[in-house]
Image: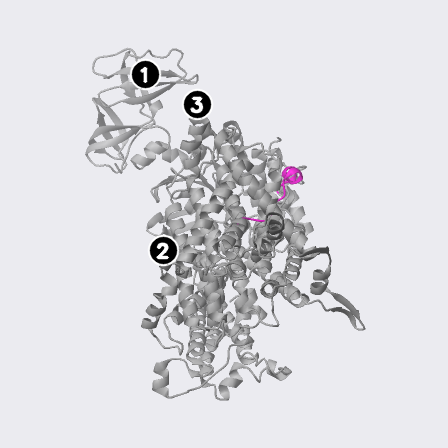
Amino acid sequence: MNKMSSVHSLSRSPTSKKQAASVEFRNVTKRYGSVTAVDNVSFTIEPGQLVTLLGPSGCGKTTTLRMIAGLEMASEGQILIGDRDVTNLSAADRDVSMVFQSYALFPHMSVLENVAYGPSVQGVPKKDAYAMAMEKLEIIGLKGLEKRAPSELSGGQQQRVAVARALVLEPQVLLFDEPLSNLDAKLRRRVREDIRELQQNLNLTVAYVTHDQEEALAVSDHIIVMSNARIAQTGTPHELYEEPANLFVADFIGDANIITGDLASIAGPMAQVRIGGLNLQLPHRGAGQGPVKLAARPDAIFLDEAVQAGALAGTVRKTSYLGTQVEYDVESPIGNLFVVQYGRKEAIAPGTPVAISFSNQRGVAIIPDA
Amino acid sequence: MSRATLGWIVLSWVGFALLPWYGFDRSAAPTLADYFISGSGLVHGLRGAWWLLPILVPLGMALIPVARSSARPGTWLVASGLLGLALIVLQGFTIGLNGWTLDILRALFGEPGPNQAGMGYGAALTSASFLIVLCHGLAARGWCRGDTFVTSSIGVVIALIIVFVFFPVTTILASAFADNSGNFAPSEFVAKFMDKSIWGLDCLSSDLRCGVAWNTLFLGLLVAFGTTALGLAFALIATRTEFRYKKLLRVMSILPIITPPFVIGLALILLFGRSGALSAVLWEWFGVPRSRWIYGLPGVLIAQLLAFTPIAFLVLIGVVQGISPTLEEASQTLRAKSWTTFWTVTLPLMRPGLANAFLLGFVESLADFGNPLVLAGNYEVLSTKIFFAVVGAQQDQGRAAVLSIILLAFTLGAFWLQHAWLGKKVYTTVTGKGDSGIPLPLPRRVALASYFTAIPWALFTVAVYAIIIVGAFVRSMGRDYTPTFEHFITAFRVERADWGLYFSGSAWNSFFATVKVAALSAPLTAAIGLLTAYLLTRQRFSGQRSFEFGTLLSFAIPGTVVGVSYILAFNVPPIEITGTGFILVMCFVFRNMPVGVRSGIATLSQIDKSLDEASLTLGARSFTTMRRVVLPLLRPAIVASLVYSFVRAMTAVSAVIFLVTAEYNMATTYIVGRVEAGEFGLAIAYSTALILVMLLAIVAIQLVVGERRLGRRSASGAPSPIAVQAIP
């Protein structure tokens, strides 16, 4: 399988006049009978950005994506694409394409017919439609396979045909519904990089649904984390990881130790927090005095076998050696901690008493909504 | 506003202002002027038919959004469509051929009041346009994601079901509660309902006959039990043994489907009747006296067993194949002997399937009309009794309606049982995971039992069909075995006259009418059935459950009941279509549509919904998506429903026998007539010809529709789709 190497040299074809468009949700709600699938959601996707809708299954992220496509109609609220109200427009009338989880390639058409389907149903003459399709197949690196039936391609190739088919109309917005879930683990990393590259080179607005937080962190400009039909937090990958707004996001994005501390005093943007005898200077993020919950990333907790008096003392319960890193379960007065250490040659044996400390720079944050 | 909406608004005006509002008097040939303007609703309205004039209001309302673009088009269109339909229905049902149809109106406005004939092209077009305008309006208000194709399809299917299923059924219910002059008379209903000839139990205590309801139930239970047992034996042989002639079993299972229902009864008469072939042999060689034993319960029972065993076979073969071998292997590894495994695992897993086959056999027996008509003699069943209540010396429509209601209650009850009891109990043992087990060979005694039931029965079936073929080519079965083409010549003679070919054979008229009606109804049935299946599987709208119930209801109604109800409903204005070919076509469409719906649903649910959605997001509208994505993938279902509806239209007797006229005589009713006249040879010859035509048609449909292409790999070695499907 050849890579999408030609992507670099290509940008939006000069003939196309379309610009990437923004997508805006204003207080959108979707109900199925008594079930509320999406509850009063508002967000904006800026033009040319890749925004991921991230969340566990059943959180409403796919419904949100399908509402952008027009495959579901909002029960309440407004949807705008490129400042145009499309709330009541059907899918066929919106300038949006979608890459489906199952790829949804038409089994009775060849690869070329599949990709040319969009223009041909728009009334473009067959010859021109095929030319447009060939152009996109070339971008995607599938030239030479256009006569094949979809069933004769590998999973990765089928996925790229689906992308080519979605690109052929040069839509204002491109949607991906868990595009990597049918690929094996190694291929996944590469395809997600290809998608990101394609998006940046063609300057596309992309909405991308996934339940895999690593995938989301890797490809997105922005991530919208959804939980129970609502938006839990919106932000850049860095913001979500370092400053989770609530327990759900802290737990869902990466691993986090949720520990209880005591906010002693506030000075400017910073606050003095006591965690089991340790004092930490952290941004207060709107929390008041009193007990607070904190998220501590596993790699922001340090273990030291040289136990000093006065330090937070713990005991290693379990050790897993994973090559690049070593993972520990540590028993401590502030609860059981999950700790990851990188670049360590010798793992600490289970049963060893250790001193526990926290990173001052990053990885520990007060959770304001907890 | 879209051009399509505008077009329908124009059509509604055309229907009202230009086309003839009323149907033509069949005795007078219409002139060209009758077709345009002079017979239109508008002209009639101005000339005294004042009740047509209010229709101008909704017609005008539809124009408001055309004139003013600022007006909310959806609301106006919905209002116009609703009001228009309401007005047309109201005037149609209150003003009949002989004045007011309701006593209240007669009392209020005096007798007889205004009168009008049945609706014609204009009324039909205007009503249809109002309906579509209404649907477009609903789409504009955001129903079904604003898709006019979907809302219009739903509207059209619902309207057709209301007119051709619910309206006749309500009419029959109403007429059961009315006396002969049409007044409400519940006491008469009770009297008719409790009649001794229906519920009498004299046969238990004396020599007198039992009530017709008990007869019907008893026959139904016997047939259901027999077909299930025989079908199971065949299914076990076909799937679990090394039997060499399995393919033959498959062919035999298709044969009865393309056989007109009474042909088997006819063959039985030719074999066992007083002058039957076997009776003659028995008399001449063994001195067994000729008797009429075949006429009555034994004859009907044998004929129905022959006719419906294949249906049970087709149901049960799917059930037996569906049992995962791993379950049986699991049982064996737990050290159960093969007999124990069969008894404790295999058979219990088949229980829902067996019950399904049993209920189907029961319902088929109840609905069967052809065989009892030919064979039942003094053993009366409901379907024939209904027929004689309508056409016989009694001419008692109320009685026919009461009997119809009882029959309808039986079949609906059986379907309800099936739904309520089996709906939750289907043991799906075929999962997405690969099952690599090998089916357990049958325990010896089960295999032997199956062979001993199935093989004699198969031989008997072959003998019956041999009789049909032989009977067509000999002078007279049982008496004179001289080979002859005489029957074919009588039926299908073609003479060369000065002006060309002259089809002088006695069967040509009915033959052409049958082929015409079947060829018209098959594509319509397939189209409406598959459209319904598409709506049911691919769209979400409120009231979907009752929509589904409505489409499948017509399948549960026995043909005889359909026939009676169509006569009662469509013999008077506003919809006066008895005696036309149209009523035959519509009757077939709605009798056979459920098969199209089911095969459509089965195929569509295998096609991933995201294919449609992909097409939608690429800018194709629902209609384009349907044409370019769904239909090519639906080819097996198209073939199945085309074949089924064509074959059914060629072989049906029960509903049609009420609806035929001299002009539109159907092949089957013609054959029944010949049987009643004792011209068995002619009847058999005609039946053979019909079977041949159907086989040709099946092959032709396969060729025209073709197979679906799912990539080159599968296309080469793929087996052709099954042409004929079991009645589900």
Residue corresponding to mark 3? B333
Of badges 1 and 2, the one in the foreground is 2
Residue A207, percent across and down?
47, 43
The amino acid beneath tag 1 is Lys
The amino acid beneath tag 2 is Leu
Of badges 3 and 1, the one in the foreground is 3
- The correct choice, above or below, for B415 with respect to B31 in the image is above
Residue corresponding to mark 1? A318
Q: Tell me which chain the residue with mark 2 is part of.
A: B
- Which type of secondary structure does the marked residue at label 2 adopt? helix
Residue corresponding to mark 2? B204
Q: Is residue B120 magenta?
A: no
- The correct choice, above or below, for A101 with respect to B377 in the image is above
- Left or right? Give the position of B502 relative to A287: right
Q: Is residue B714 magenta?
A: yes
Residue positioned 43% across, 81% down in the render: B95
Residue B514, percent across and down?
62, 64
